[in-house]
Amino acid sequence: MADLTSAPVPPPGPEDHVRGEGELLIVYADLGCAHCAAAWTEIVGRPGRLVFRHFPVASKHPRAPALHAAAEAAGRQGHFFAMVDSLYGDRGHVDDPHLWRRAEELGLDLDRFEADRRSDAVAQRVRRDFTAGIRAGVARTPALFGVAALRPEDRGRV
Amino acid sequence: MIAVGESAPDFTLRDQDGEEVSLADFRGRKVMLVFYPFDFSPVCSDQLSLYQEVKPEIEEKGVTLVGVSVDSPYAHKAFQAKLGVDTTLLADFEPKGEVARAYGSYIDGPGMANRTLVLVDEDGKVAWTYESPNPGEFPGANVIFDALA
């Protein structure tokens, strides 16, 4: 079992999904969360470097694990944020056929998307973000962190 | 708030299924009492949903998570179903808030428990407590794991 005791927010790393340049903004978000969807336009509209971290709360949003897996699978074909934008832009169509339609609209290889979103590697990738969020004290989403949330020794590197 | 090292006041309350549950039932095992204001309130919903996500890890530490509020067993049952959680929820319903009062968690004006965590050890002693600065905030799950480390 993972260590879930308190720890600072991890600095951006090569696995992270990053959009934009400039001042760091790390967001822990739930793709099934209405508050996150409502805030998404404002979050992506801010100038700076946005790092998206997965924080699905499945008991509250039963489709959240599937949505995060879909976004991660889209990311493996270079379209992570396009899928996130799509999911937050239309929260009413989140069943599997809707995910396939979204993948097609993004021009993804559907067989690969399907295999990736159901893979252990993707589930583990999502869980790593979730675990780091728990350790950082994320309680509700969206949870936003700036550079001050990082360890002092990490702040100069980002 | 009850002090660490004190004997945890025993109680017998009904759970979401109407079954009686006593603190003494947990003797020999740790139990984390999660006092919260009300079923269906937005913050309480987020808190119990979050803890559900790490319940296996909490249980791995030999700890049973138990929610306590002033709501009735019927409300607890509906709340459990709405949230999709299986944490035992105890009804501190009549006399209202008696258990929360015994633990120093009750807030008189609004008539509810504050958001409070109480870890009771295997011998029935209070091993750790946490009280939110106000009922609108709840501690992240990391706080629970820090207490169990």
Image: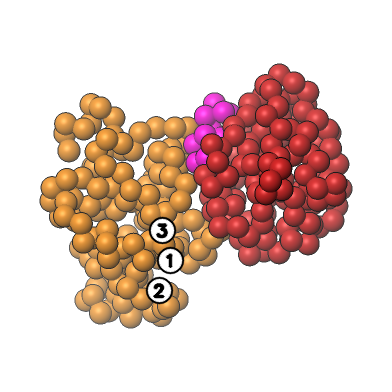
User: Do callouts 2 and 3 point to residues on the same chain?
Assistant: yes
Q: Residues within 10 Å of mark 1 (few under 14, many from 20)?
A: some
Q: Is A70 colored magenta in this rendering?
A: no
Viewer-nearest of discs 2 and 1:
1
Chain at tag 1? A
Residue A148 place in picture, x, y as percent = 27, 35
Q: State left or right for residue A32 relative to residue A100.
A: right
Q: Amino acid at mark 2?
A: Arg
Residue A82 placement: quadrant:
bottom left
The residue singled out by tag 3 in the image is A30
User: Do callouts 3 and 1 point to residues on the same chain?
Assistant: yes
Task: Give the overall secondary structure of the magenta segment.
Answer: helix
Q: Residues within 10 Å of mark 3 (few under 14, many from 20)?
A: many
- From the viewer's perspective, is residue A105 above or below residue B88? below
Chain at tag 3? A
Query: Which residue occupies the foreground of this view, A114 or B122?
Result: B122
The residue singled out by tag 2 in the image is A91
Magenta range is B138-149
Query: Which residue occupies the foreground of this view, B57 or B83?
Result: B83
